[in-house]
Image (cartoon, grey):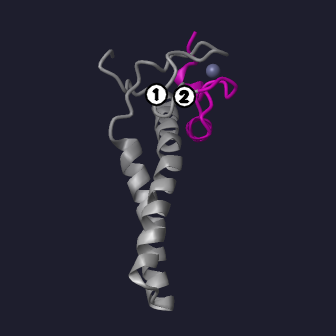
Amino acid sequence: MSLPLDARPKMSSALRGLMGACPACGRGRLMKSYLKQVDRCAQCGEEYGHMRADDAPPWMTILIVGHIVIPAVLHMEQAYQPESWVHFAIWPALTLALTMVLLPRCKGAVLGLLWSTGAPGSERA
Ligand SMILES: [Zn+2]
């Protein structure tokens, strides 16, 4: 009981996935653990277990985190010239925290976009 492709808006599907919600109905959960999607939505029954986002979520995460952390490091160094221990205390922790927060959201967005385009995203198709 899958929605036809022309009834799958790409932006809202990606945004629903980004929020961890089912791209099809927006009510069910998309992720059952940190990085593992549900086999099917508990609300609408849409299947997601076969979809593979592959390397796209890590690449998106690296791109976003890099564009936040690197300019912040450079700005802090140029503006305040802090001791090295300050850099070592702040930037690895911030990088790890941002990565942990963004990675599952990026995976959800990629799965939502894959679902909306009808791309197989699996070895099954
Ligand atoms: Zn659903």
The label shown at residue 61 is none
- What type is the residue that disc 2 sits on? Met
Residue at disc 2, CB closer than 8 Å to ligand 1? no
Quadrant housing the N terminus: top right
Could you say whether the residue bearing mark 2 is in a helix, strand or loop?
A: loop
Q: Nearer the viewer, residue 16 or 58?
A: 58
The magenta stretch is 1-29
Task: Read off the residue under disc 2.
Answer: 31
Question: Residue at coordinates 48% horizontally, 21% vertically from top-left?
Answer: 48
Distance in Å between CA atoms under marks 1 and 2: 6 Å
- In the rendered view, does 93 fall on the left or right side of 54? right
**Label 1 secondary element:** loop
Circle 1/circle 2 CB separation < 8 Å: yes
Q: Nearer the viewer, residue 35 or 67?
A: 35
**Residue at 42% of width from left, 77% of height from top?**
85
Magenta stretch containing residue 75, yes or no? no
Instruction: Name the quadrant containing residue 11.
Output: top right
x and y percent of residue 54 in the render?
33, 35
Residue 22 horizontal/vertical position (percent): 61, 27
Depth order, front residue of 109/104: 104
Q: Nearer the viewer, residue 93 or 102?
A: 93
- Above or below residue 39? Residue 118 is below
Residue 80 lies, with reference to residue 56, above or below; the image says below
The x and y percentages for residue 19 are 62, 39
Residue 36 is labelled as 1
Identity of the residue drawn at 42% across and 81% down? 74
Sequence-first tag of 1 and 2: 2
